[in-house]
Amino acid sequence: DAARRGIAFYSILQTSDGHFAGDYGGPHFLLPGLVVAWYVMGRPSAMISPPQQALMLHYLKVHQQKDGGWGTHIESPSTMFGTTVCYLAVRLLGGGKDAEWIKSGREFIQKEGGAVMTSSWAKFWLCLIGCMDWKGHNSVPPEMWLLPNWFPFHPGRLWCHCRMVYLPMGYLYGSKFIYSDAETDPLIAELRKELYCQPYNSIDWDSTRNLVAPMDNYSPIPAFMKFSQKCLSIYENWKIFDPFRNAVRKAGLLFCSEYMKAEDLQTNYINIG
């Protein structure tokens, strides 16, 4: 009888295609990334169906803090990181900007100085969706993979999770990927107004690269890292470096593309997750 009840319980958890999904609840910085990817890919229902959209909105609503923000995870106090990515996900999933709980989230962001004060992962998703200029994001050069393996800053020397995040992030940064309909999508136009405390087109993006809200600044950026990022910004933006950068970037993007394909195959598309 116990075996029958156990089988009955697990049959409830089985998905329609036969597999048993693993719960990955808790972090608030994973679901928004999926939502951004879904949105820029044209909102395929096979990826997120309308009922799933509604459930995701419900999940985000019930985990909102009393101050209007969201934490980095469900037990965290509100952070600009958690709030910015969750607010972005809510709006992309169809949440109306005039709903009281959504207005509360927007007020939290603006009270803390706008989305320029969020942390790097949130800025990355904002750049992809077209709600932040790539100049507002510190450099993630894919050509770092071309360095000798013994080099201290080679991405292959990073912890596995950092390495597997740097890989696709470097590819998207290096190609300066932006949602193709960003300039014509009315929702993106609304988000550009909602997320900032000044007109979007008036923001000096380069000056915002190292901005981060005190509540998110667990480990202040050391002077050496700021200097390094400034050097990379010069490398990224000065015309004098264009011939060299364009050549090595093309090779770096190709390396990343091949590495990602290999990682998919050798993990049966499970990857680091």
Image (cartoon, rainbow, N blue to C red):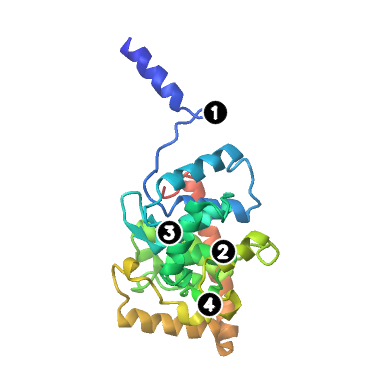
| Picture layout, residue 227 above or below residue 72 | below
> x%, y% of residue 125?
51, 62
What residue is disc 2 on?
Answer: 128
Nearest to the observer: residue 145 or residue 90: 90
Front of the two marks 1 and 3: 3
Residue at left 53%, top 77%?
135
Q: CA distance from mark 3 to mark 4?
A: 22 Å
Nearest to the observer: residue 36 or residue 57: 57
User: Is residue 68 shown left or right of residue 201?
Assistant: left
Mark 3 or mark 4: which comes first in sequence?
3
Front of the two marks 3 and 4: 3
Of helix, strand and loop, which one carries label 3? helix
Q: CA distance from mark 1 to mark 3?
A: 33 Å
Residue at left 42%, top 63%?
108
Q: CA distance from mark 2 to mark 1?
A: 32 Å
> x%, y% of residue 113?
43, 72
